[in-house]
């Protein structure tokens, strides 16, 4: 099932309650090998902006309507503040159990301000997420949730550009 659009037609929300921004990338190799692992190009690309289910789990949030209020807050925020891709920042290999992916880190405008608002409004201390796009996966589909600096530190490592050109 495809993610559904929210806040107009720029952002989507998935079945895992992740608010995302789609990005278009063309001309990438269909497969690459990193650390001996053959990885396949995903067929679509997005930046996970707000991983609501992961936030609920990591912060033990008991508010039953949290998903709905965060989506409402996000839509109100983006009505006044553009949240867009600014730049790509470097490649990383991610590994978690049997999952293997290659991601490219990126900068996103105003997302830090949204998390400041959410933290203040709900009395939370959610870390600004490490914005990235999953380019390749062991099965061409399954990514790894990387929602804070601990995930980046523990589950990824920096790698040279595996695609042979800039994005």
Image (cartoon, rainbow, N blue to C red):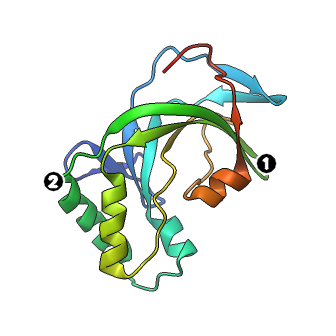
Drawn side of residue 137 relative to residue 9, left or right = right
Residue that appears at 64% across and 23% down? 161
The vertical placement of 114 against 82, above or below, is: below
Q: How would you rate the neighbour count of disc 2 (Cα within 10 Å): few for under 14, some for 14-19, many for 20 or more?
A: few
Of the pair 12 and 91, the residue shown nearer to us: 91
Drawn side of residue 117 relative to residue 32, left or right = left
Q: Tell me if residue 136 can be seen.
A: no
Q: Earlier in the sequence, mark 2 or mark 1?
A: 2
Residue that appears at 55% across and 74% down? 57
List x then y, in percent, for residue 98.
79, 48
List x then y, in percent, for residue 24.
40, 27
Of the pair 14 and 144, the residue shown nearer to us: 144
For label 2, the SS is: loop
Residue that appears at 61% across and 16% down? 29
Q: How would you rate the neighbour count of disc 1 (Cα within 10 Å): few for under 14, some for 14-19, many for 20 or more?
A: few
- Disc number at residue 79? 2
List x then y, in percent, for residue 165.
56, 14
Based on the displayed image, in which of its 4 quarters is residue 28 positioned? Answer: top right
Residue that appears at 31% across and 59% down? 113
Based on the displayed image, in which of its 4 quarters is residue 75 positioned? Answer: bottom left
Mark 1 — residue? 98
């Amino acid at each position: 099932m495809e993610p559904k659009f929210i806040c107009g037609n720029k952002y989507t929300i998935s079945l895992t309650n992740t608010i995302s921004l789609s990005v278009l990338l063309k001309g990438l190799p269909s497969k690459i090998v990193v650390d001996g692992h053959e990885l396949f190009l995903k067929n679509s690309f997005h930046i996970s902006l707000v991983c609501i289910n992961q936030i609920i789990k990591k912060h033990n949030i008991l508010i039953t309507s949290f998903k709905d209020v965060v989506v409402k807050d996000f839509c109100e925020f983006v009505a006044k503040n553009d949240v867009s891709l600014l730049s790509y920042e470097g490649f990383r290999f991610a590994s978690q159990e049997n999952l293997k992916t290659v991601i490219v880190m990126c900068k996103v405008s105003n997302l830090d301000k949204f998390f400041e608002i959410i933290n203040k409004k709900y009395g939370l201390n959610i870390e600004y997420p490490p914005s990235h796009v999953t380019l390749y996966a062991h099965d061409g589909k399954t990514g790894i949730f990387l929602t804070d600096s601990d995930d980046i530190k523990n589950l990824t490592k920096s790698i040279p550009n595996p695609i042979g050109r800039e994005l």
